[in-house]
Amino acid sequence: MSLDTAETRTERPQGGGRRAYLSLYKALGRGWIRDRSQIFFTILLPLMFMVLLASVFGGGDTAASRIVAVGDVAVLDGADPEVFTVTGASDLDEALAMLREGDADAAVVQDGSTVRIYPSATNSTSGAIAAGNLSALVDDVNVEVLSAAAPNEPVLETDIEQADGGALKPIQYLAPGILAWGVAITGVFGAAGTIVDWKRDKLLRRLRLTPASVGTFLSAKVSVNLTVAVGQTAVFLAVAALGFGLHLSAWTWFAVPLVLLGTLAFLAIGVVIGGVAQTSPAAAGLSNLVTMPMAFVSGAFYPLALSPEWVQWISYASPMRYLNEALQSVVVYGEPPSAVLPQIGFLAVFAALVALLSWKTFKFDEL
Amino acid sequence: MDAAIEVADLRKTYRGRRTGEVRAVDGVSFRVERGEFFGILGPNGAGKTTTLEIVEGLRRPDSGEVRLLGRSPWPHSPELTRRLGVQLQASAFFEFLSAREQIETFAELYGASKARAAEMLDLVGLTEHANVRCEKLSGGQQQRLSIACALVGDPELVFLDEPTAALDPQARRNLWDLMRGINAEGRTVVLTTHYMEEAEALCDRVAIMDAGKIKAVDSPAGFVRSLDAPTRVTVAAGQVSDERIKELAAGEAVTGGDGTVVFETRDPRELLTALASEGALDGLAVRTANLEDVFLHVTGREWRA
């Protein structure tokens, strides 16, 4: 061990920002992989939610709506058995009892030209789907009748290109929703927890006194988080496809830039929380306080269309909503990236605004 | 050649919602020469750490100037930080990394080799624990690893902020040897401590700090000399007659009680020789003035570290 002279010192290779970046990335990445709680929160927890919610909302295989016909319901005569499974009931009370028990998705009564639909309140999601399917069936029958009466009148026809060759399965809205939620909690909890850790162990303060700049360190940290988000997305979509029969579109790869952008937005939220919180429990509590309501107003766990209107209004301010929508569009419906430009725009603006806020409010002295 | 550190009239005031205005650093100036072992001694809350953080460039002072190795620590410059080694009060480690991975990461940041990292780990006696995760190391081992990380870049100037706080006496002595070695290699060392005996044992010069101000700067020996305090010699009572005690005291103060006689003398050699010749050395204790007395003298307050 010897003290360098000024001469030998200048000959030392100037490691530069890139080398420092790589060693920091390596050190932080290693730390992440060894932290079992991180693996749980980013990978296992979202998968657990998917298993749980997929079973709550019915298996992906029983896509047909279970209809109880009360008495004679003529409109159901020509119904596609792939869309409807029809059972009979002698009166409305019996049919409603079946709905309550969860044995059917909707009851139908036909009274002359009026088709009365009773969607299930017990299982409101499949109830709504059944009601929608029934309305479409009634419309089809009407069109047939009208066309027969006026054969020369042109009729508009819908040609629905169904992404999965069938009705909307729960996995098709659960997968993008839960993935968006998983990315959100990873980002928010991750950033908030890290900031609070730095307040305690002064790692950032120590690193500020090395030749590496703070910018190098922060970009290494963000890079680790982005890598994690990509890995998380890959594992999650693989399980959704192989385990739950989610059909992945050709545009699925575009989930990667979407998730990266979303992660930036959620990291920024986490930095704001980490700036306010002084302890790890406080950071976790505040992160929950932000991400849980956000998940519920963003259609992460059930279709947003089934939520009350005021919830839908709030959802416009939630980045999770846009990430969810964009993921569903490209992964499930196979829409090209150009279709989700509004969502991308919102996420980018949101990330920029929150990053600005965190920058302005952050007290570097605490670190 | 520039001084290692030049600090002129630093001021820093914290404004807390509950605490009101606290003048953490209130007009601090000092200079540290190259190769010196410089101590900042003061009780907790004296402003030592804030002063050190301003000097290192972690905090900006409200006013005043700092030159480190001839340049300003602000803004951050790789050329300057490459020449500094820093150990902070909290052990700042990457989570879930072993001692070796830790120091190798720091080595890479300073552009130092893996061999250098291993050498430093060996220097602080942690080679056996190289594969132990940092959070599993004992307090003393963490401090040593922290110091190894500070040294890995082969710094000219080393800052150590209360490295021995919360260590047991044995671990503290080991660290003292380590710190002496660092300074002996020609590195300038700046140490903050609230242990009197630590400052006395290690430092070439000590700045005594209290309530945000540096009260005095001198070598430990110089402080004690300038205090011109008498040596206190204690022996068990009943070994010499009262008249003889008065003779031995030669006009200086004698106190007693609790079965002891305490002489205060400017000439301890003569007194001790006399006591020895009369075989009156039972229960002998000799206490010269130390930095604790100096602190009392300089600040007008009892030491309350």
Image (spheres, coloured by chain):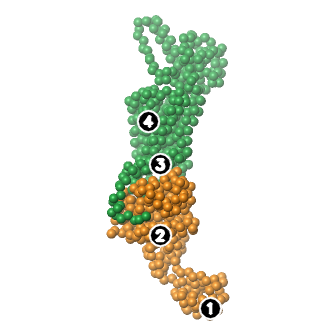
Amino acid on which the number 3 mark rests in the picture: Leu
Instruction: Give the image location of residue A1, x and y in percent.
Output: 43, 64
Q: Who's orange, chain-wise?
A: B
Residue ID at (40%, 38%): A348
Instruction: Give the image location of residue A2, x and y in percent.
Output: 41, 65
Amino acid on which the number 2 mark rests in the picture: Arg
Q: Which residue is mark 2?
A: B180
Badge 2 marks a residue whose secondary structure is: helix
Most foreground residue, A163 or A305? A163
Q: Quick check: do tags 4 and 1 share a chain?
A: no
Q: Quick check: do tags 4 and 3 share a chain?
A: yes
Amino acid on which the number 1 mark rests in the picture: Glu
Q: Which residue is mark 4?
A: A256
Q: Who's green, chain-wise?
A: A
Mark number displayed over residue A28: 3
Instruction: Give the image location of residue B192, x and y in percent.
Output: 47, 67
Q: Which chain letter matches label 3?
A: A
Instruction: Give the image location of residue A294, x and y in percent.
Output: 50, 38
Badge 3: how crowded within 10 Å, few (<14), some, or many (20+)?
many
Q: Could you tell me how far apart the alpha carbons at marks 4 and 3 are, in whole angstroms?
A: 22 Å
Residue ID at (59%, 22%): A105
Badge 4: how crowded within 10 Å, few (<14), some, or many (20+)?
some
Q: Quick check: do tags 2 and 4 share a chain?
A: no
Q: Which residue is mark 1?
A: B278
Residue ID at (63%, 88%): B280
Chain-order first, disc 4 or disc 3 = 3
Q: Which chain letter matches label 1?
A: B
A177 is higher (above) or lower (below) than A68: below
